[in-house]
Amino acid sequence: MVTAIVIYNSRGGNTRKVAEKIAEGLEVECVNHKNIPKNIEDYDLLVLGTWPMMFKVRGKSKRWLTKFSKKKIDGKKVVLFFTSAGPDEVLPSTKDTNPKLIKEMVFETMESIINAENKVTILDERFYSLGALRMFGKIMDKEGHPTEEELGQAKAFGEMLKEKFNA
């Protein structure tokens, strides 16, 4: 039986909501990045989530992932997720040369931070959900992401992880 935990960093609450639904589906504990258990080495599967800024993981998101990667997580399996406005859009700076989706860039950045020393296994199972578009501290979209449907998808993702990894 695999022991798992969901750990997230959320700026406006969207990533927290998604994290809680993934944890609900997995039937495991969900904690904010400020409350990472001291016994993190006892977990086999770490589900880590954050939010990007300007198409990459930077600032506070990058700091907590960098700090987390220095904990005793060698040999762990890691699943990544994030919330962002427009993850299925092409990254503007790659449009003319080598088109890359925002979600690809975010996952690549997260993976490079968490697995900088190749001590963990980043799994192919990944999840992303729309989040609010924020500019200058204001929410620019009025749709209210994540929606109930998106939260249902997050829970289903957690259920899939539970089944696949016998968590």
Image: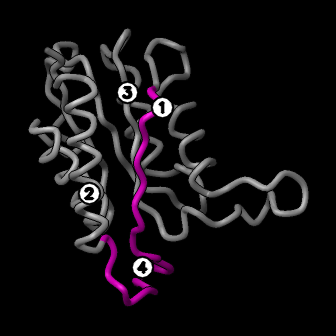
The residue that appears at 61% across and 48% down in the rendered structure is: 104
Q: Looking at numbered disc 2 in the image, what kind of residue is underneath it?
A: Val
Report the front residue among 68 and 17.
17
Instruction: First in sequence, mark 3 or 4: give its number.
Output: 3
For marks 3 and 1, give the CA distance: 9 Å
What residue is disc 2 on? 18
Q: Please identify, in this view, whether the residue under mark 2 or under mark 4 is nearer the observer.
A: 2
Extent of the magenta region: 123-146
Residue 61 % position (x, y): 42, 48
The residue that appears at 22% across and 13% down in the rendered structure is: 41
Q: Callout 4: few (<14), some (14-19), or many (20+) C-alpha neighbours within 10 Å?
A: few
Residue 57 % position (x, y): 52, 49
Q: Please identify, in this view, whether the residue under mark 4 or under mark 1 is nearer the observer.
A: 1
| 33 part of magenta stretch | no
Residue 7 % position (x, y): 25, 40
What residue is disc 4 on? 137
What residue is disc 1 on? 124
Q: Please identify, in this view, whether the residue under mark 2 or under mark 1 is nearer the observer.
A: 1
Q: Please identify, in this view, whether the residue under mark 3 or under mark 4 is nearer the observer.
A: 3
Q: Identify whether 160 is placed above or below 100.
A: above
Instruction: First in sequence, mark 2 or 4: give its number.
Output: 2
Q: Which mark is residue 60?
A: none
Q: Identify whether 104 is placed above or below 13.
A: above
What secondary structure is found at the residue carrying circle 2? helix
Q: Looking at numbered disc 4 in the image, what kind of residue is underneath it?
A: Gly
What residue is disc 3 on? 78
